[in-house]
Image: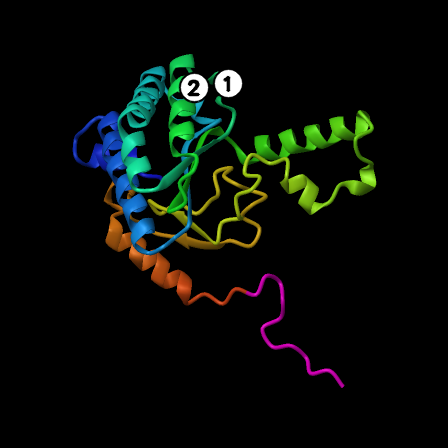
Amino acid sequence: MDGNGRWANAKGLSRVAGHKKGVDSVKNLIKGCLQHDVPYLSIFAFSSENWSRPSTEVSALMELLSSALLHQSKKLHENGVKLTIIGDTSKLDPSIQRLASEAIALTSNNTALHFNVAINYGGRWDIVNAARTLAQRVKDGEMSVEDIDEESFGSELATAGIPDPDLYIRTSGEYRLSNFMLWQAAYSEFYFVDTLWPDFDEDAFTEALYRYTHRDRRFGAAEDKIKQT
């Protein structure tokens, strides 16, 4: 969800104002997923690298997160949305951890949309954490090295139980993954758009879905298989 700061700068507003406007785009995206029967939505709300931003901006982002958890959880629940937080939440303020736990518990049985929010998350962190967990299990004699495969590795990722993303959307004209779901995006379809995140509305999301439906997903298989003789 890139471009909040540039959107704000272009309008002579603070970066915080851009982030606040970006929250509205998240709401529109959730609405769009429900309308189009998209079962899973994952957003990158705060990366493990974002802590290096100015302290005032980090504080504002944490306040926005706290406010969203406090005021939007009931609406998520009313619309059948299940909230999941992925990432290392131990660094978050205890009050935010409490609000997150309450929101997760409130929405735990919902099935209309699985809404996964990555907070203090990084793809490399996720992979290293899974590797350490498997290494410890081998050390403890719970499994052998030969037992380690893609399935066992995936089961230790922060996204365990969540399907790999079919469509990966990056806004604001940037062409990079920015350390988001590196393992999980192996066969995702990528959609890059110049639109800044606060301007990414339901029509823009519908266009992204339309483009996705015209992709030919082969997962490594040849487009034209050689006829066997």
Residue nearest the observer in this picture, 189 or 70: 70
**Mark 2, residues whose alpha carbon is within 10 Å: few (<14), some, or many (≥20)?**
some
Q: Quadrant of the N terminus?
A: top left
Measured from the top left, where is residue 27 in percent x and y?
27, 40
Question: Residue 149 appears in which quarter of the rendering?
Answer: top right
Q: At x 23% / y 34%, what residue is drawn? A: 21
CB under 8 Å between discs 2 and 1: yes
Q: Quadrant of the C terminus?
A: bottom right
Q: At x 48% / y 22%, what residue is drawn? A: 89
Furthest residue to the bottom?
A: 229
Q: Is the stretch drawn in magenta largely helix, strand or loop?
A: loop
Residue 84 versus residue 208 in the image, above or below: above
Please give the range of residues in magenta. Answer: 218-229
Q: At x 42% / y 28%, what residue is drawn? A: 105
The mark found on residue 90 in the picture is 1
* Separation of marks 2 and 1 at Cα, in angstroms: 8 Å
Question: Residue 107 appears in which quarter of the rendering?
Answer: top left
The mark found on residue 97 in the picture is 2
SS for tag 1?
helix
Mark 2: amino acid: Gln
Could you tell whether 203 is left or right of 86 in the image?
left
Residue 127 versus residue 28 in the image, above or below: above
The mark found on residue 52 in the picture is none
Could you tell whether 114 is left or right of 159 in the image?
left
